């Protein structure tokens, strides 16, 4: 069964286009390294919860939007191999130099995890 990486992050609203460009760059690498699908979703209707919510989960500020993303891999093993190859790429590819190409969000507040699906509907 497929394997999923999921992400929630806060992106300054003024950086929406920069985020899209960054995501297109990264997502194309995920696809080149075997991802089946990548989805990037910009906040549209994210409500404040009673006990917790997406905004509090990533300590979002008023000027930030929530982004919900996932990567679908053919298997956990394919995902692990892709990340191993990307680690090597990040050491040699200048496009990963954060001083030249800064990430348009605070990665320290991003939440992420990997998930094994239990069922899937078409």
Image: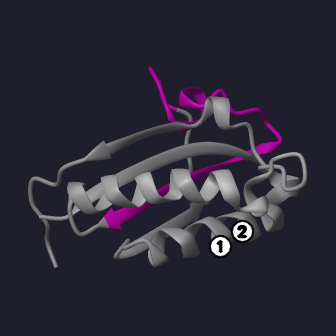
Location of the N terminus by quadrant is bottom left
Q: Are marks 1 and 2 in contact (CB under 8 Å)?
A: yes
Label 2 environment density (alpha carbons within 10 Å; few <14, some 14–19, many ≥20): some
Relative depth, front residue between 34 and 16: 34
**C-alpha span from label 1 to label 2:** 6 Å
35 on left or right of 60: left
Q: Secondary structure at mark 2?
A: helix
Q: Residue furthest top?
A: 51
Mark closer to the observer (1, 2): 1
**Disc assigned to residue 24:** 1
- Give the percent coordinates (x, y) of residue 12: 81, 47
What is the span of residues highlighted in magenta in the rendered image?
49-72
57 on left or right of 99: left
Residue labelled with disc 2: 20
Is 64 colored magenta in this rendering? Answer: yes
Q: Secondary structure at mark 1?
A: helix
**Can the viewer see residue 42 in this picture?**
yes
**Disc assigned to residue 55:** none
């Amino acid at each position: 069964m497929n394997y999923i990486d999921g992400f929630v992050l806060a992106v300054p609203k003024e950086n929406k286009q920069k985020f899209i460009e960054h995501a297109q760059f990264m997502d194309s690498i995920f696809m080149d390294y075997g991802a089946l699908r990548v989805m990037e979703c910009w906040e549209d209707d994210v409500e404040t919860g009673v006990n917790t919510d997406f905004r509090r989960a990533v300590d979002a500020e008023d000027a930030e939007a929530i982004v919900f993303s996932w990567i679908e891999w053919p298997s956990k093993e394919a995902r692990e191999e892709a990340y191993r190859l990307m680690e090597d790429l990040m050491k040699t590819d200048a496009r990963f130099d954060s001083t030249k190409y800064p990430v348009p969000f605070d990665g320290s507040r991003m939440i992420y995890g990997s998930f094994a699906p239990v069922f899937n509907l078409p």
